[in-house]
Amino acid sequence: MSCIYIHIPFCKTRCIYCDFFSTTQLELREQYVDAVCKEVELSKKYLDEDEIHSIYFGGGTPSQLTTSQIGRILNTIQVHHPIVKNCETTIELNPDDVTDEYVANLRSLPINRVSLGIQTFNEDTLRFIHRRHTSQQAIDAVRRLQKNGFNNISIDLMFGFPNETLEDWQTDIERALQLDIQHISAYSLMYEEGTELYRLLTSQQIHEIDEDLSRNMYQILIERLTDAGFEHYEISNFAKPGFYSRHNSSYWNDIKYLGIGAGAHSYNGVSRQSNISNLKAYIDGIHQGMPKFETEMLTPDQQYNETVMTRLRTNKGLDTDTIKERFGTDYYKHLMTAATPYYNIGLLKYEGHHLVLTRKGIYTSNDIISSLFV
C-alpha cells in the first residue's frame, strides 16, 4: 500500500508566507502536464507495484489546471499503477477558482476529497497575506462543493498573524464550524526565510505575536474543535470520525509515497528522493528521459528520528515495541531513558505500549520530540 503526490506549482500570485516551490509562469502549464504524465510512466517501478490507496494534488494551486488536464494525469496514473477501489483522491483548491463550471467538471473525475486553502475569514488579513479570495468567496466555495455532492471537505486555517487577537481567531474557528465540513488543518504562521513575510519581519515593519498568545490560540482551537465533535488526530489536524486524511496519515505512518512534479519528494522506506525545484530544468529533464533529482540514503539514526517525529505527532503515538523490533535494543533503551523525565512531569503518557503526548505535552511537542532523537 502506497500513495502518490502530484505537485502543481502554478499560482496566479504568490502569498507572502509561502516557501513551497511555486511559479507564476502559467504559460507553461500544458508542457508541465505533459512532463508530469511522462514522469508517472518513468517512475512506475519506484513503488514496486504497490497498490495506491491515496492520490493527492498539492501546490502551488492545483486549481490553476483545467479539469481536463487533471483528468489526463489521473488517467496516466491509472494506466501505470494499480489503484484500490476506494482510493482517496484529493485536490487542493483556491476558493476563487471554485466556479459552478469548474466544480461540475471536477465532479466527473474520480476525485472524492477537496482541500480548500482558506487560511482566514478576516478580510484585512486576507489582503495582507495576498490571498486572492474574500471571506464570502470562501464560504461560497464550500457551499458550491457541497451542493455538487462533495462530502469530504477540508479547509486550511492559520493563526498567529501580526496584530491578530484571540477574538479574531475565535471568530475564524466559529465561521469554519458553521460550514459543516469534515476536516480542518490549522497551522501557526511561520516566518520562513526567503519569503516576503520574513522580509517584513526582519525590517521590523511587522512583529510576531507573543508566545503566550499563540499558545492560547492553539489551546482554544483544540478545545473548541473537540467540543464540536472533531478528533484531534495529529498536532495540526482535526477530523470528524471516519474522515482522517488517508494521504497525510501515510506520511506519519512510514508508508511509501511517490512524489511527481518539480520540487516533489518521494520516500521508499530507505531513501528520500527530491525532484529539482526549477520548472524548465524539470520539464527538459523529463522529456530527455533523464529526470533531475537527488537521492539521500537514510541512516538508521535518521530512520529512527523520523519514526519518532512522525508517530509522536499523532494521537496514537509511538509504538515502543516497534522501535525495539525495527531498530534494536540500544535505540529502545535510549528512547525509554530520554522519555522518562517527560513522563514523570505529565508531558508524555503510556497507552499500552504506545508513547503518546499529553494535552499539556502537545504545547511543547517540538522540544520533547527533538530531545528523544539520537
Image: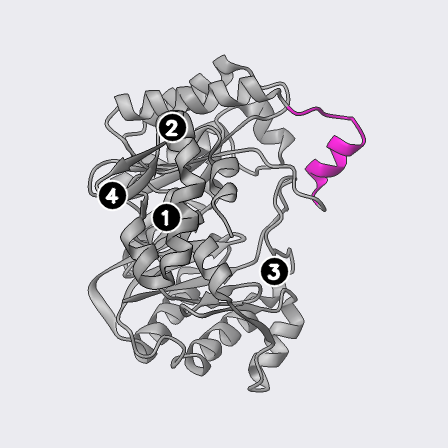
Alpha carbons under labels 3 and 4: distance apart? 33 Å
State the residue position of label 3.
26
Q: Which residues are magenta?
A: 195-208
Q: Quadrant of residue 32?
A: bottom right
- The amino acid beneath tag 1 is Arg
Residue 267 lies left or right of residue 143; in this view the side is right
Q: Quadrant of residue 213?
A: top right
| Image coords of residue 66 (percent x, y) | 45, 60
Residue located at (45% from left, 41% from top): 338
Q: Is residue 152 above or below residue 323?
A: above
Pick the quarter of the image with the N terminus: bottom left
| Image coords of residue 57 (percent x, y) | 42, 58
Q: Which of label 4 and label 1 is nearer to you?
A: 1
Secondary element at image label 2: helix
- The amino acid beneath tag 3 is Leu
Disc assigned to residue 311? 1
Q: Nearer the viewer, residue 39 or 297?
A: 297
State the residue position of label 4.
243
Q: Which of label 1 and label 3 is nearer to you?
A: 1
- The amino acid beneath tag 2 is Asn
Disc assigned to residue 344? 2
The answer to the question of whether label 1 and label 3 lie on touching residues, with beta carbons closer than 8 A, is no
Residue 45 lies left or right of residue 126; in this view the side is left
Please tell me which of labels 4 and 1 falls first in the chain. Answer: 4
Q: Which of label 3 and label 4 is nearer to you?
A: 4
- The amino acid beneath tag 4 is Phe
| Image coords of residue 299 (percent x, y) | 51, 66
